[in-house]
Amino acid sequence: MKDLEEFRKERDLIISEIGEFDEEDFVRSGISLEEYTNPNEETIKKLIEYVSREYDQTSIYSE
């Protein structure tokens, strides 16, 4: 099972693809600051879904 640090690395990798995750992204993705700060598998799934819906550069994140 992954630990928090691994999920943070995944989150940061995804965010690096889109530049930054600002207030509007939180609202549109449905991810709370708490989830973003302490990501788990569900947070990463939400993030991937959001980024793939909003941006076209997520083909590398397909499972």
Image: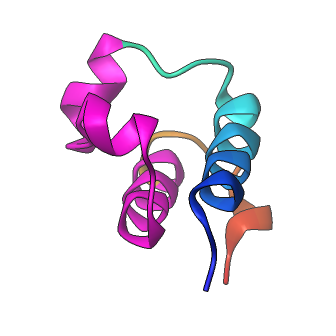
Q: Is residue 60 left or right of residue 28?
A: right
Taking the spot 56% from the left edge, 40% from the top edge, the residue there is 55
Image spot of residue 33 (x, y percent): 29, 29
Q: Closer to the camera, 4 or 48?
A: 4
Asked if 32 appears above or below 41 in the picture, the reply is above
Residue 38, magenta (yes or no): yes
Q: Is residue 34 left or right of residue 51?
A: left
Taking the spot 39% from the left edge, 58% from the top edge, the residue there is 43
Where is the N terminus found, in terms of image quarters? Answer: bottom right
Residue with the most extreme top position: 23
Image spot of residue 25 (x, y percent): 35, 26
Asked if 37 appears above or below 44 in the picture, the reply is above
Q: Tell me which secondary structure the magenta stretch mostly adopts.
A: helix
Residue 44, magenta (yes or no): yes
Q: Quadrant of residue 61?
A: bottom right
How many numbered markers are drawn?
0
Taking the spot 43% from the left edge, 45% from the top edge, the residue there is 38
Q: Closer to the camera, 36 or 21?
A: 36
Q: Closer to the camera, 19 or 38?
A: 38
Q: Closer to the camera, 1 or 59?
A: 1
Q: Quadrant of residue 62?
A: bottom right
Q: Quadrant of residue 54?
A: top left
Image spot of residue 3 (x, y percent): 61, 67
Image spot of residue 5 (x, y percent): 67, 52
Write down the region rendered in magenta: 23-52
Where is the C terminus found, in terms of image quarters? Answer: bottom right
What colour scheme governs how the chains and residues are painted in the rendered image of this protein? Answer: rainbow
